[in-house]
Image (cartoon, helix red, strand yellow):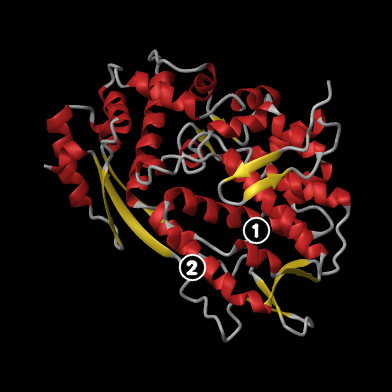
Amino acid sequence: MSINKNKIFNDPVYGFITLPSDLVFDIIEHPWFQRLRRIRQLGLTHMVYPGALHTRFHHALGALHLMTEAIESIKSKGHEITKEEETGAYIAILLHDIGHGPFSHALENSIVTGLSHETLSNLIMEKLNNEFNGQLSIAIEIFKNTYKKKFLHQLVSSQLDMDRLDYLNRDSFYTGVMEGTIGSQRIIKMLNVFNDELVVDEKGLYSIEKFIIARRLMYWQVYLHKTVLSAENMLVNILKRAKELYQSGEKLFTSPALEYFLKNNINAENIQNKEEFLNVFSQLDDYDIYGAIKVWCGHSDIVLSTLCKGMINRKLYKISLQRDEFDAATLSEFNSKISNHWGIKEEDYHYFAFTGNISNSDYNPLGEPIKILMRNQQGVILLGDNEKMDVAILSTPVNKYFFCYMPELAV
């Protein structure tokens, strides 16, 4: 029986999204891509913004939709993009986040080390390419920036790519933080190519300025919101404690996929059996983590059970942020409270009170800068070199220090 692959998705952000090819449909149908339905785009952000329950599946389809529009916009300005290159760009953006695990950044800082989601995306794409008989080869080259047309990679990964254009609008929509809304349609219409580089027509300058400002607002209001930061650090510590206990011989309830990561010290250098690793990773999602945390609430280890109860009941770390580092005396004072309240070992105090820092830069002019195509189309200037826009403030990194401690210690 033949399958109708001309599917249409009804997206709350863009309306109807039409899939551009049968191959794209087949990739979306693959179990490894369907896993993205079970991974939230914003991890624990729903603890601050209850509507932030959208998934990486949503985001991937949205980024694909924007890529189809960007390709059409660039082609309309006389730049040649073959059918094979179009398909490669569509697949590259569709799969750009397929290497994300559950609560990706928390996972990368707890039970795996030195293994970024970009590395995993590349491994998965290579595996899928074998399954699809080499039909993803151009997509992989575009993703890795080894394809001859560099601007195609910039559409997938740069400071003005389809990934960012989608997640800003999508995350703004689902959180209700309207300051993150950007004019993605206008920006896409202003995209152009000059000397094989993605550029923006000069008349789109103010749309780019709004895009960078929106990104700044979303980072400090959503992605780096102090309560989100608190929740993510609690999850990191839960997973670290679980791994510590598991490897010391403690019996823990886990799914087979989560057990694999608690048992093995996974990093980029020691993945001996990539086939086994990818098969297990493709089974790991948010449900594995949440299911384990619910059960661990009753574990005999006071550190693990206390942290898990805090996560399940939203009794998160109290958190303070400031521009300067916290002094050692502050931490010492809380350590004595920990001893009195729980009577745990000194080497475990850091699970209940600790310091850290965060940093963010909205635009990096020293990286791959956004380039503006002059009205005469005879040359480009870097964003910020135009007298109409000063990006000095937006490109200055902002550093903050935080202090987290269990709410029981606030008294």
Are dots 1 and 2 in contact, CB under 8 Å? no
**Split into 4 quadrants, where in the image is the C terminus?**
top left
Residue at horizontal 51 percent and vertical 39 percent from the top:
104
Relative to 157, 39 lies left or right: left
147 is higher (above) or lower (below) than 120: below
How many marks the image carries: the answer is 2
- Snapshot quadrant of residue 307: top left
Residue 283 visible at all: yes
Residue at horizontal 60 percent and vertical 82 percent from the top:
385
Residue at horizontal 33 percent and vertical 56 percent from the top:
401
- Residue 84 appears at what percent x and percent y? 87, 48
Give the alpha-carbon distance from disc 1 to disc 2, as whole Å: 16 Å
- Residue 25 appears at what percent x and percent y? 75, 36
117 is higher (above) or lower (below) than 151: above
Residue 361 visible at all: no
- Secondary structure found at label 2: helix
- Secondary structure found at label 1: loop
- Say what amino acid the circle numbered 2 marks: Ile
Q: Sequence order check: which comes first, mark 1 or mark 2?
A: 1
- Say what amino acid the circle numbered 1 marks: Asp
* In the foreground, 8 or 60: 8
**Split into 4 quadrants, where in the image is the N terminus?**
top right
- Residue 242 appears at what percent x and percent y? 39, 24
Q: Residues within 10 Å of mark 1 (few under 14, many from 20)?
A: many
347 is higher (above) or lower (below) than 196: above
Residue at horizontal 48 percent and vertical 68 percent from the top:
213
The residue that label 1 is drawn on is 161
Relative to 260, 9 lies left or right: right
Numbered label attached to residue 213: 2
- Snapshot quadrant of residue 315: top left
Relative to 338, 233 lies left or right: right
- Snapshot quadrant of residue 100: top right
